Image (cartoon, rainbow, N blue to C red):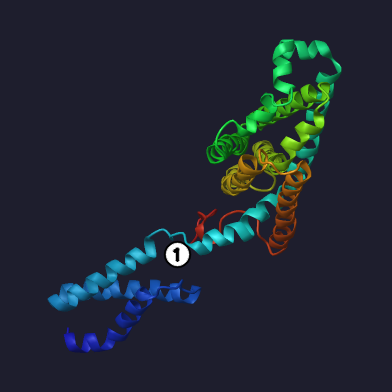
Amino acid sequence: MDLDVFVTAHRAEWDRLEELLRRRRRLTGAEVDELVALYQRTSTHLSQVQSSAPDPVLTGRLTTLVARARSAVTSPRRSSWRDAARFFTVGFPAAVYRTRHWWVPTAIISTLVAVLIGWWIAAHPEVQSAIGAPHELREMTRPGGQYETYYSSNPAASFAAQVWTNNAQAVAIALIFGVFLGIPVLWVLFINMANLGVGIGLMSSAGRLDVFLGLILPHGLLELTAVFVAAGTGLRLGWTVIDPGPRSRRVALAQEGRAAIGMAIGLAAVLFVSGVIEGFVTPSGLPTWARITIGVIAELVFLAYVFVLGRRAILVGETGDIEAGDRSAEVPTAA
């Protein structure tokens, strides 16, 4: 092999490969294809040089170039701020909007259950007696009692963090364990609605339901919406096990499971906002109407976010799943 002629013939390809590897912006599809082709050719060139004309300088350059190209071609794509922005502006709202036929009925039925439990407790003194002794109930419901001091029992920041952690765990259980036919989801819903119903019933029987609602609504609207979204998504995941539709069960569970995990991240952000409201707004000295207004605004912003951005994303084909390029191939593909 005439080494000078070989270098002259292929130097432009090596320079182009090096240029593509130096790019800091994301490559286009055509540039990625070009990178892979140049990587394969340069690997062949390196093999030819090593076997026919082992020049140390050229071998060193081509070895480094091939190693860098192999890393660029075979390494997993790194997440970027663009991915995070896309998730919160497209992926997450699309996933929530797509599951609206599950979580909206879940929200309505669950709220009715909480109200019925509250009415049952308020209308039946014997049920109240089963919950606690008379002096215990008075301590819970009196002015300055446990229901009111609960929200100011700890410093606002630590209380908000504790609330966020507890709620995020409940949401994660509802999402992830929905695969067990949705049974754990129903348990999480029941516990939350039972607790809410007990508060409604006891405070109503004490003639202080307005105080209770003034404490629960500022953060509870957004917090419960997040729980309902998680529960509806978990129930949908459980139903996918039973009826995967036209997809295979493995593919259906993979798609719905990835979307559910993504929603856990998004709902954690939603619960962070509700936790901040619960820690700083609910126990504040603001008038009741002002605290409730803040909660209503937060809820309306979230609903607009889902039904405007989410609907727009669904119309262009988004599903809330990860990008197609980051998924495993669902059928064998030819190289």
Front-lying residue, 312 or 146: 146
Question: Where's residue 220, x and y in %?
Answer: 71, 39
Front-lying residue, 322 or 299: 299
Question: Where's residue 63, x and y in %?
Answer: 23, 70
Determine if residue 243 is in view.
no
Q: Is residue 128 shown above or below 48?
A: above
- The reply, left or right, for residue 163 in relation to residue 207 is left
Question: Where's residue 112, x and y in %?
Answer: 82, 32
Front-lying residue, 149 or 51: 149
| The quarter of the displayed image where residue 186 is located | top right
Front-lying residue, 322 or 167: 167
- The reply, left or right, for residue 34 in relation to residue 117 is left
| The quarter of the displayed image where residue 316 is located | bottom right
- The reply, left or right, for residue 204 in relation to residue 195 is right
Label 1 element class: loop
- The reply, left or right, for residue 25 in relation to residue 157 is left
Q: Quadrant of the C terminus?
A: bottom left
Label tally:
1
Residue matched to label 1: 335
For disc 1, the neighbor class at 10 Å (few under 14, some 14 to 19, many from 20) is few
Q: Quadrant of the N terminus?
A: bottom left
Question: Where's residue 243, x and y in %?
Answer: 69, 39
Q: Is residue 121 shown above or below 285?
A: above
Q: Is residue 35 shown above or below 74?
A: below
Dot 1 amino acid type:
Ala
| The quarter of the displayed image where residue 40 is located | bottom left
Determine if residue 266 is in view.
yes
Residue at 50% over, 54% down: 328
Residue at 74% over, 56% down: 304
